[in-house]
Image: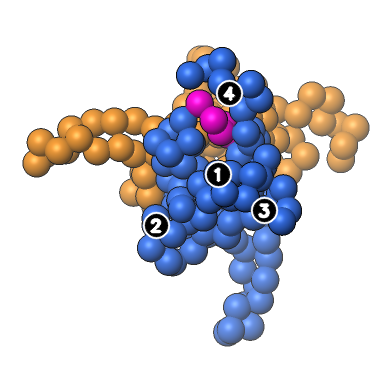
Chain colours: A orange, B blue
């Protein structure tokens, strides 16, 4: 069991990703979970991070760091395209008991 | 003329927002520009920030800080809904001449 994991957000049902994040913290004792997405799924990754930290893991987990970047790749038509990415690092709040 | 401005990203053509950001820095001498968006436009706000900083203002402007949050409001059907928001702070790189 690792203490560090990544959830890639894509086209699956929204709650799959939220549950994935919550389970890493609650059942797998992760101290950090990274939520990643590309292109149009970036909005969804932000929703996953917000719902996980504000509704399910309130006062237990916080957004620690957010990075954005660009990736270039060649699409099936042979054209060079650019896509944005987001990396949202969620972290267990130390001494959470005092906050509740 | 202010040295601080906000670009709200929505449904207008993509380049409108990029041009808005670039003009604030280049023509209005802003030292900081904040790119904001809600809901599905979050992905677009990230694209705007990436294209502005990596293509048009390379080595001149960097992403300084990114915040995500949630806003609650009542929709036209009277239901309480939650929407995610993003705030991307872009900042002029000091001593940019040495970087080029």
What element does badge 1 sit on? helix
Please identify the dominant SS of the magenta region: strand
- Secondary-structure class at tag 2: helix
Chain of the residue where label 4 is placed in the rendered structure = B
Q: Residue at x 38, y 50 (%)?
A: A40
Q: Is residue B62 magenta?
A: yes
The CA distance from mark 2 to mark 1 is: 19 Å
Choose the circle earlier in sequence order: 4 or 2.
Answer: 2
Q: Is residue B21 visible?
A: no
Q: Percent x, y for residue B60?
A: 54, 30
The earlier-in-sequence mark between 1 and 3 is 3
- Label 3 belongs to which residue? B5
Please report contact status of discs 1 and 4: CB closer than 8 Å, yes or no. Answer: no
Q: Secondary structure at mark 4?
A: helix
- Residue range highlighted in magenta: B59-63
Which mark, by number, is residue B36?
none
Q: Secondary structure at mark 3?
A: strand
Is A31 placed above or below A58 here? above
Total number of numbered labels?
Answer: 4
Q: Which residue is mark 2?
A: B14
């Amino acid at each position: 069991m690792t203490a560090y994991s990544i959830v890639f957000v894509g086209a699956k049902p929204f709650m799959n990703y939220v549950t994935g994040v919550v389970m890493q913290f609650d059942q797998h004792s992760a101290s950090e979970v990274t939520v990643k997405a590309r292109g149009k799924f970036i909005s969804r990754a932000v929703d996953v991070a917000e719902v996980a930290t504000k509704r399910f893991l309130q006062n237990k987990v916080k957004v620690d760091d957010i990075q954005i970047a660009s990736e270039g790749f060649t699409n099936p038509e042979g054209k060079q395209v650019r896509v944005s990415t987001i990396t949202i690092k969620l972290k267990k709040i130390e001494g959470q008991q005092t906050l509740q």
